[in-house]
Image: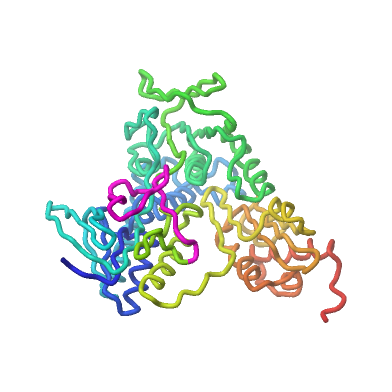
Amino acid sequence: MNQYDLVVVGSGPAGRRAAIQAAKLGKKVLVVEQGKRVGGVSVHTGTIPSKTLRETALNLTGWRERGFYGRAYRVKQEISADDLRRRLLITLDHEVEVLEHQFARNRVQHLRGKASFIDPLTLQIVKDDGETIRVSGTSILLAVGTKPFRPSYIPFDGKTVLDSDELLEIEDLPRSLAVIGAGVIGIEYATIFSALDTHVTVIDPKTTMLDFIDREIVEDFTYQLRDRNVKLHLGQKAEKVERTADGKCSITLDSGRVIGCEMVLFAAGRMGATDTLNLPAAGLEADSRGRLSVNPETFQTSVPNIYAAGDVVGFPSLASTSMEQGRIAARVAVGAIAKEPPKFFPYGIYAVPEISTCGLTEEEVKERGIAYECGIARFRETSRGHIMGLDSGLLKLIFSLKTRRLLGVHIVGEGATELVHIGQAVLNLKGTVEYFVENTFNYPTLAEAYKIAGLDAGNRMGELISRG
């Protein structure tokens, strides 16, 4: 039986970052991945594929240029699923190559196979060729990620009724698509296909969507979706999904409404991929969605030598935060000092348009009883926005009236997931409105929107007379 300092199950963002961190500390590390190639869900069916699909769609459709040339403008008149898949395969090959090189350079061992617990220190691994081996780890990190939730009443067939993993394998682009689920994944794919001129309908039993995002940002985003004819059936549940005789689909809502479409994407939640791990043998138990509970500071489970990180531990389920969770878990697991990460991290939604947020929403500020002021900038107010042909895009800053400190930054529009990092830095360094008012930004840039929003808030807050 092979003995390791750290055995990592899963090679997604949390797993690979943990493995490399432990290896850099001189530890003997093994990564077990049951997929065909390393990278986990993030590389093969999640983060990288969906973002590559988004970028390809925007490039081939000429979406970013339509502000100048009109809605009929196209870079490529006929876009096929093969056009989208070609760029995707190139990107995935590159990601896998980089990851395998990182493992080799840091002497991280990895093998393909399905892992399950024999006891808290020992894993059984069934390799592809049927060979079974046992490995032992002083510490074990579970970074197995998630898989799509597939309820029994949805007639999945991989062609016309699909989950978010299967969507990447479609042979033809649908003329109409119904997305069941208005969460992050559902909204991202709904807007990407809308940009490809697919008629999109979004269905969700909740009357609101993206509730963790500032309401003003969601309202602006919703307006943009409706403006391009995305149908939103919120507060309505899909009770029945059927395939019709002509090869299309029919969805019956609890309101009695029937929606016809060529393809259905079911994207209402994901499950922790823990069902094959034999958790009871290790003394662990997952919740109803297959997720594991951990100490949020150390990512240690209820079993001292077993850790979990990434999507399998639940919100925020971001590749960026998963990487940091894996790094912290690995340091704790091998006895190294692990500093607590900064309080505020950015959340990015790669929809069309992008949404990104960091810090407190206006709703959270109100709930805490903090006296505040907001500053707003619209991308069309910036010279760069005019140059780019942007007629939408919004940046919102929230400041404390008492301390003048930045409390939250919220953006919807082109480049939001890049722009948010300026606000993130100011937040974590406890900066005030004066930073934005007095600082110089490159001109012309979209980042200049920070200056505009800072001035907008500062004018209402009044000047700071004394600096003590």
Q: Is residue 295 magenta?
A: yes
User: Could you say where residue 17 lies in the image, as x and y percent from the top left?
Assistant: 38, 67
Q: Say which residue appears at 54% left-offset and 34% top-offset.
A: 204
Comparing 284 with 63, the one in front is: 284
Side of 76 relative to 203 (left or right)? left
Q: Is residue 416 above or below residue 230?
A: below
Q: Is residue 279 above or below residue 444?
A: above
Side of 283 relative to 457 (left or right)? left
**Which image quadrant for residue 325?**
bottom left
Q: Is residue 242 above or below residue 332?
A: above
**Which image quadrant for residue 234?**
top right
Q: Quadrant of the C terminus?
A: bottom right
In the displayed orientation, state which residue is furthest to the bottom.
468
Q: Say which residue appears at 47% left-offset and 56% top-offset.
A: 318
Majority SS type along the magenta span: loop
Q: Is residue 4 above or below residue 32?
A: below
Q: Quadrant of the N terminus?
A: bottom left
Q: What colour scheme was applied to this rendering of the protein? A: rainbow
User: Could you say where residue 124 lies in the image, as x and y percent from the top left?
Assistant: 20, 56
Q: Is residue 365 magenta?
A: no
User: Could you say where residue 437 lies in the image, as x and y percent from the top left?
Assistant: 76, 70
Q: Say which residue appears at 64% left-offset and 73% top-offset.
A: 429
